[in-house]
Image (tube, rainbow, N blue to C red):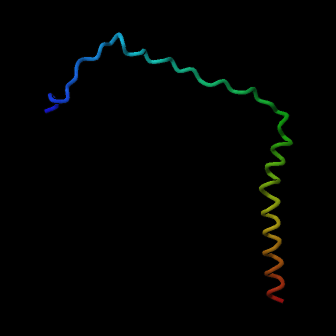
Amino acid sequence: MMDEYYVGDIDPSSVPSKPKYTPAKQAPYNPDKSSEFIIKILQFLVPLLILGLAVAVRYYTKSS
């Protein structure tokens, strides 16, 4: 069935060997990044706080 597509045999000496996996080097852990963590938390929480305050003000002024 596939005889018309047969080109030839593969020469095993011409096939490159599979490279050994070497994991990427990780940067050493720096515990002095607590200020960056606080900034990321604030960047998430401050907009939520503003949104919650806006919804509360709208709800309060609508009910009065």
Quadrant of the image containing the C terminus: bottom right
**Residue occupying image coordinates x 57% and y 20%:** 22
Residue 25 rendering spot, x and y as whole percentages = 66, 24
Please say if 39 is above or below 31. Answer: below
Q: Residue furthest top?
A: 13
Towards the viewer: 4 or 55? 4
Please say if 49 is above or below 54. Answer: above
Q: Seen in the image, is 18 located left or right of residue 54?
A: left
**Residue occupying image coordinates x 80% and y 54%:** 43
Asked where in the image residue 33 lies, by quadrant, the reply is top right
**Residue occupying image coordinates x 83% and y 82%:** 60
**Residue occupying image coordinates x 81% and y 76%:** 56
Quadrant of the image containing the N terminus: top left
Residue 38 rendering spot, x and y as whole percentages = 84, 47
Numbered label tally = 0
Q: Residue furthest bottom?
A: 64
Residue 2 rendering spot, x and y as whole percentages = 16, 31
Q: Seen in the image, is 38 located left or right of residue 7?
A: right
Asked where in the image residue 34 lies, by quadrant, the reply is top right
